Structures are given as C-alpha cells and as structure tokens.
Image (spheres, grey):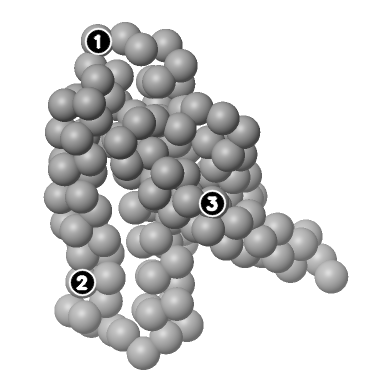
C-alpha cells in the first residue's frame, strides 16, 4: 500500500462518515441549530475530507489543481456553519444554514461526480448535470432552512 492508496482509503472513510453524519446534523437542526459533539464531528470530518483531497491532488497536481480550491471552500463553509451558532453574530442563522448546507452540497457533489462520471456511466452533457443539480436543489433547501431558522430565532 503506497501513500496514494492510504490517502484514498482515508478520504473514502471520512467522506462516507461526513455524508452520514452531515445528514444527521442537518436533519436534527431543522428548527434549531445543533451545537454539540455531532456538529463538531461533522466539522472535523469535512476538514479531514478536504485535507485528504488536497493530499490526493498533490500527487496529481497538474490535472487536478482546481479540486484544492473546492476542498478549501467546502471546509470554510463547514467552519462557518460550526462557528455561527456559537458566536451568534448578526445574520448567524443564515451563516449556519449556508455553511452547513453548502459544505454538505460539496460532499454530495463530490460523491456523485466520482460515482457517476469518473468511475460511472455519465459523460458529456449528462456529466455536467451531476455538477449542477446538487447545487440547484441544495440551494433551494438551504434558503428554506435559513428562513425557518430566522423565524424560530
């Protein structure tokens, strides 16, 4: 097992854990932000996914450099979602919803892209939909969540 295999295995494990835990955290925080160990663990899972993604792309830098930008954005969103309810600044409900939701969209999109385009059946225009649809659907859900949190708070 070389460094690539080790990073890939770790990336898959923390990515799967992040997807599962993110769904739980988002579901449990529909009405009130979740500020506990589960939300902290989700934040660290996204951090680990981002770090392992950057580690993997460093092994194939010229072709995949742009994934580093996406990994950093995903983590920054998770950090925003983690910090917002803990500091409760003006507009924190929106920051929480957009941070948690945006980082989760990034995880879902990455999973679908790898499963359906890199190693799967979709190519060409259909592959573009895999990149766009999670954001379109997720953004609408985030906006609804944001409004629900503001109305409750």
What kind of element bears circle 2?
Answer: helix
For the question of whether residue 65 can be seen, the reply is no
* C-alpha span from label 3 to label 1: 27 Å
Q: In which quarter of the image is residue 56?
A: bottom right
Q: Looking at the image, is mark 2 or mark 1 earlier in the sequence? A: 1
Say whether residue 127 is left or right of residue 4: left
Question: How many labels were placed on the picture?
Answer: 3
What kind of element bears circle 1?
Answer: loop
Say whether residue 91 is left or right of residue 42: left
Residue 29 percent across, percent down from the top left: 38, 39
Residue 11 drawn above or below residue 73: below
Find the residue positioned furthest to the right. Answer: 1
Q: Quadrant of residue 12?
A: bottom right
Say whether residue 52 is left or right of residue 105: right
Q: Please identify the quadrant where the C terminus is shown.
A: top left
Q: Please identify the quadrant where the N terminus is shown.
A: bottom right
Residue 139 percent across, percent down from the top left: 19, 48
Which residue is under mark 1? 90
What kind of element bears circle 3?
Answer: helix
Q: Dots 2 and 3: beta carbons under 8 Å?
A: no
Q: Of discs 2 and 1, which sits in the foreground?
A: 1
Q: Looking at the image, is mark 2 or mark 3 earlier in the sequence? A: 3
For the question of whether residue 104 can be seen, the reply is yes
Residue at 30%, 36% (x, y): give it. Answer: 31
Q: Quadrant of residue 11?
A: bottom right
Which residue is under mark 2? 129
Residue at 38%, 20% (x, y): give it. Answer: 84
Residue 123 percent across, percent down from the top left: 29, 84
Of residues 131 and 147, the one nearer the viewer is 147
Which residue is under mark 3? 21
Residue at 34%, 53% (x, y): give it. Answer: 105
């Amino acid at each position: 097992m070389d460094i690539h295999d080790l990073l890939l295995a770790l990336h898959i494990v923390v990515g799967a854990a992040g997807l599962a835990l993110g769904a739980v955290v988002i579901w449990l925080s529909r009405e009130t932000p979740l500020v506990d160990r589960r939300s902290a663990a989700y934040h660290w899972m996204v951090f680990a996914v981002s770090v392992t993604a950057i580690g993997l792309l460093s092994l194939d830098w010229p072709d995949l450099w742009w994934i580093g930008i996406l990994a950093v954005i995903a983590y920054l969103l998770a950090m925003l979602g983690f910090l917002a309810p803990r500091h409760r600044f003006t507009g924190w409900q929106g920051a929480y919803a957009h941070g948690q939701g945006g980082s989760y969209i990034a995880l879902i999109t990455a999973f679908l892209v790898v499963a359906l385009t890199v190693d799967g059946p979709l190519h060409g225009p259909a592959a573009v939909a895999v990149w766009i649809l999670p954001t379109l659907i997720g953004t609408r859900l985030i906006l609804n969540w944001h409004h629900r949190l503001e109305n409750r708070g």
